[in-house]
Every structure is written in C-alpha cells, then in structure tokens.
Image (cartoon, rainbow, N blue to C red):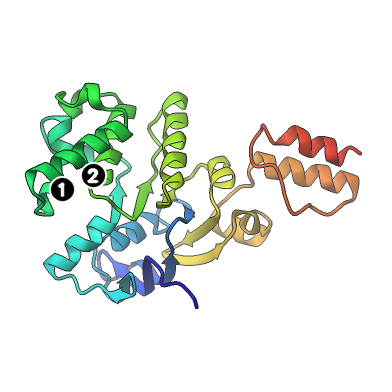
C-alpha cells in the first residue's frame, strides 16, 4: 500500500497580478525523509511554490493536501500547516522580528498556544541544535550573516516541523558558513526530517539531493533524480542549467574509454579517485 505523502500539491496555480502566472498547474508530492532540490532560473516559480507549500500564499487554482487532508485555510488548519511545513527565507532579515535571539525563537511556539514550560523546552532544544546558546540574549540583527541564518533555522526547528523549505539558503554565505549549513542539513536529514532546498548551486544539488524538481516559467518541467536531470541536454537547456563539474568530468572519462556511464558516479571530490582508478583499468 502506497504511503500518504506528507505534503501534496495538485494542479496548483498562482498569479500575483492575475495576468501572468507565477505557477501553472503544478503537482508534486513530498514524503517524509526526502531530500529534494528545487532548480530553475530566476523567476521560474521556485519561491512562489514554497510560499504555497507553507500556506503564506493560497493557490488561486488547485489544492494543497497535508497528510492526505485538503487544506481549507481556516486559522487552526493554517497554523497546523505552518507548524508541519517550515520555511527559511533567503534573506534572514525578512524573517527575524524579535529583539533577542531567545525571543525570536520563542515567537512561533508561543503562537501555537503552548504553555511556558513547553515553549522553554523548545527554545533550549533549538538553541542547542544551532549552537546559539551564547547568543541567546543578543539582538539578532547585530549577528553575522551565518549566525542570522542559524537563528532563522532555529525559529523553524522550535515549531517541530516535519518538512523544512530553504529558499536560496547559501546565497549570502561565505564558504565556511556554507559548509556549516550543509552540515546542518546532514544533521536534520539524519533525524528523518524532509528537506527541500531551492538553489542555484548545481554542485550542491548533485551531491546532496535524492530528487530534483525543475521549474521554468511557472511550470514544473521535471520531477526526477539529479542524474536524470543532468543527462537530459534538452531539459537543461530549457531550464537554464549546467552540468555539475564532477558529472561532466565523469561523463568525459567514460566517453574517452568508450564505456557507458556506470550506475554509481562520484558525487564528491573524495569519491572521485576511486572512480578514476576503476575507469583506468
């Protein structure tokens, strides 16, 4: 028996001006524990898709389902959707509201109507998870970009979500904080949490994701594995994508050897030497 998706969108459409569609008949289902990247050029519909997933936007056509039940957008059901599906914005300053890190993280659980001890436990767990205990009394707007990003993730973790959406999470981070963010993703995935990341970082998408959603002009062009995306020249050209370096190099090596691409390809630089050695036999 097929499991019920955690979140499902069926033929969802949305337009900001009711003239030009930002999303057109998009259908997608997300199951617990999945690691999904959302790819496409600027204006492809990725952010609008996330806003519909989280309930910030209500589709003008189509239906959103949470655990098999249609979302009706009544207050309590909308709170439940936003508790289950957390959204981390691209710019932390668009998400951060409170005067201290501790108050910021407590905001969501308090809006759920939890009692003070429950809120306190959730705040402590989120501070620990994001290594923010020493910053708890600081104004978040005075933190570094990487620290602010961790605060926004802690905001969402305190809601105990089942799925977290990350909109261009590394766009303003330096290499050190980008590596820290990727470590955080691994930790969250290890807890069984479903994660969906909109990104232009093709190397990250290829190495990390199990599944890719490809958007172009508001339409979902493809829902498949990253390997299937990068082996489809026509799809990449239409969506404005490029091959990851490791995939392109592996493909070139196999072509030079006159052999088909193996089922398993290196996705990280650490995996490449053994692949190259095997291809050199």
Looking at the image, do the residues carrying marks 2 and 1 touch, with CB atoms under 8 Å apart?
Answer: yes
Residue 10 is left or right of residue 266, and the answer is left
Could you give the CA–CA distance between mark 2 and mark 1, rounded to whole angstroms? Answer: 7 Å
Dot 1: what SS?
helix
Snapshot quadrant of residue 237: bottom right
Judge by depth and name the residue closer to the eye, 191 or 169: 191
Would you say residue 192 is visible in this rendering? yes
Give the image location of residue 204, x and y in percent: 54, 41
Q: Quadrant of the C terminus?
A: top right
The residue that appears at 53% across and 50% down in the rendered structure is 209
Residue 257 is left or right of residue 251, and the answer is right
Q: Which residue is mark 2?
A: 158
Dot 2: what SS?
loop
Give the image location of residue 253, x and y in percent: 82, 42
Judge by depth and name the residue closer to the eye, 110 or 46: 110
Picture layout, residue 19 above or below residue 47:
below
Residue furthest out toward the front = 117
Q: Which residue is mark 1?
A: 109
Judge by depth and name the residue closer to the eye, 151 or 257: 151
The residue that appears at 72% across and 50% down in the rendered structure is 264
The residue that appears at 58% across and 43% down in the rendered structure is 207
Would you say residue 96 is visible in this rendering? no
Crowd tier of the residue under label 2, counting other residues whose Cα lies within 10 Å: few below 14, some 14–19, many 20 or above? many
Picture layout, residue 156 above or below residue 151:
below
């Amino acid at each position: 028996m097929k499991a019920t998706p955690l979140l499902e969108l069926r033929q969802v459409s949305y337009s900001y001006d009711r003239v030009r569609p930002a999303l057109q008949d998009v259908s997608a289902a997300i199951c617990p524990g999945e690691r999904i990247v959302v790819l496409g050029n600027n204006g492809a519909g990725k952010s609008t898709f996330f806003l519909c997933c989280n309930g910030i936007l209500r589709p003008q056509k189509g239906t959103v389902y949470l655990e098999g039940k249609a979302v009706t957008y009544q207050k309590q059901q909308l709170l439940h959707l936003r508790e289950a599906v957390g959204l981390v914005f691209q710019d932390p300053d668009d998400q951060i509201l409170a005067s201290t890190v501790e108050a910021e993280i407590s905001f969501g659980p308090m809006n759920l109507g939890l009692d003070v001890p429950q809120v306190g436990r959730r705040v402590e767990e989120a501070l620990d998870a994001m290594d923010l205990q020493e910053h708890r009394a600081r104004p978040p707007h005075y933190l570094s970009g990487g620290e602010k990003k961790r605060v926004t993730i802690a905001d969402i973790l305190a809601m105990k979500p089942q799925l977290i959406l990350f909109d261009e999470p590394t766009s303003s981070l330096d290499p050190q904080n980008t590596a820290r963010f990727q470590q955080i993703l691994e930790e969250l995935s290890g807890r069984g949490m479903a994660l969906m990341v909109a990104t232009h970082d093709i190397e990250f998408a290829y190495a990390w994701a199990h599944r890719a959603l490809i958007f172009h002009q508001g339409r979902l062009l493809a829902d498949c594995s990253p390997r299937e995306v990068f082996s489809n020249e026509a799809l990449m050209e239409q969506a404005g994508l490029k091959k990851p370096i490791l995939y392109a190099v592996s493909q070139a090596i196999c072509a030079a050897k006159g052999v088909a691409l193996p089922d398993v390809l290196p996705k990280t630089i650490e995996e490449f030497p053994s692949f190259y050695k095997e291809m050199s036999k």
